[in-house]
């Protein structure tokens, strides 16, 4: 290499970086990634700094600190040290951002996925949600508590197999 010249390293494209970050899981629901949940919103270069935009599932979500640390660790493992993470709360996260494959992952994990669309009739008029039991598939279920193992879930019980389960609230 001639004196005074520098070796330039091609920086990874955003699509490749998104694939790396697709391995970052939600610490509260480890079968779902931040990509599955729709939490990972944007990845782009700004000069020599990688800018990553994430949207919390709700303001004050305790998992966000862990997610931020996992993003930074993942990127450092791939040689990216200059990272800026922005938590964007507008537009607000919604369960509508959870794809069909992720909903099936929830069900297989024992959590009933959100039903309907965010802001639907049940949210407006307080109509009870009757999620199918993720264990046996029965729709003969009842809500035990508005709050489950985390604030974004409610606790239900199946009247047929008698198993309790979390329901991921439609937000």
Image: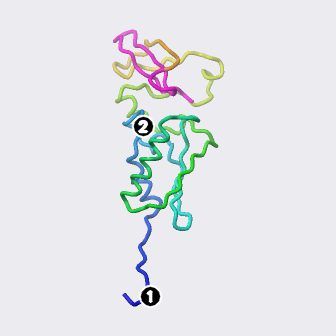
The x, y position of residue 142, in whole percent, is 47, 12
Q: Mark 1 — residue? A: 4
**In 3D space, how far apart are the residues under numbered discs 2 and 1 (Cα atoms)?**
51 Å
Q: Mark 2 — residue? A: 102
Among the 4 quarters of the image, the one containing residue 104: top left
Task: Report the span colored magenta.
Answer: 148-171
Front-most of 161 and 8?
Answer: 8
The quadrant of the image that shows the C terminus is top right
Q: Residue at x 43, y 25 (%)?
A: 112
Among the 4 quarters of the image, the one containing residue 13: bottom left
Viewer-side label of 2, 1 = 1
Give the label on residue 72, or none.
Answer: none
Q: Residue at x 43, y 71 (%)?
A: 10
Magenta stretch: residue 122 in it? no
Q: Secondary structure at mark 1?
A: loop
- Position of residue 84 relative to residue 133, above or below, is below
> As drawn, is 111 to the left or to the right of 60?
left
Query: How many numbered discs?
Result: 2
The x, y position of residue 92, in whole percent, is 61, 39
> Mark 1, residues whose alpha carbon is within 10 Å: few (<14), some, or many (≥20)?
few
Front-most of 89 and 16?
Answer: 89
Colour scheme of the rendered structure = rainbow
């Amino acid at each position: 290499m001639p004196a005074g010249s520098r070796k330039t390293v091609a920086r990874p494209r955003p699509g490749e970086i998104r694939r790396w970050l697709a391995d970052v899981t939600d610490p509260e629901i480890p079968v779902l990634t931040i990509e599955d949940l729709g939490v990972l919103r944007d990845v782009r270069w700004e000069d020599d700094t990688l800018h990553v935009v994430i949207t919390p599932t709700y303001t004050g979500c305790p998992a966000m600190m862990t997610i931020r640390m996992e993003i930074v660790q993942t990127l450092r493992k791939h040689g990216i040290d200059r990272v800026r993470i922005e938590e964007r709360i507008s537009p607000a996260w919604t369960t509508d951002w959870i794809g069909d494959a992720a909903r099936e992952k929830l069900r297989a994990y024992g959590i009933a996925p959100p039903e309907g669309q965010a802001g639907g009739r049940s949210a407006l008029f307080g109509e009870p949600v009757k999620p199918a039991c993720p264990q046996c598939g029965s729709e003969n279920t009842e809500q035990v508590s508005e709050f489950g193992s985390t604030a974004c879930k409610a606790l239900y019980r199946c009247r047929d197999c008698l198993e309790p389960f979390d329901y991921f609230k439609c937000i």
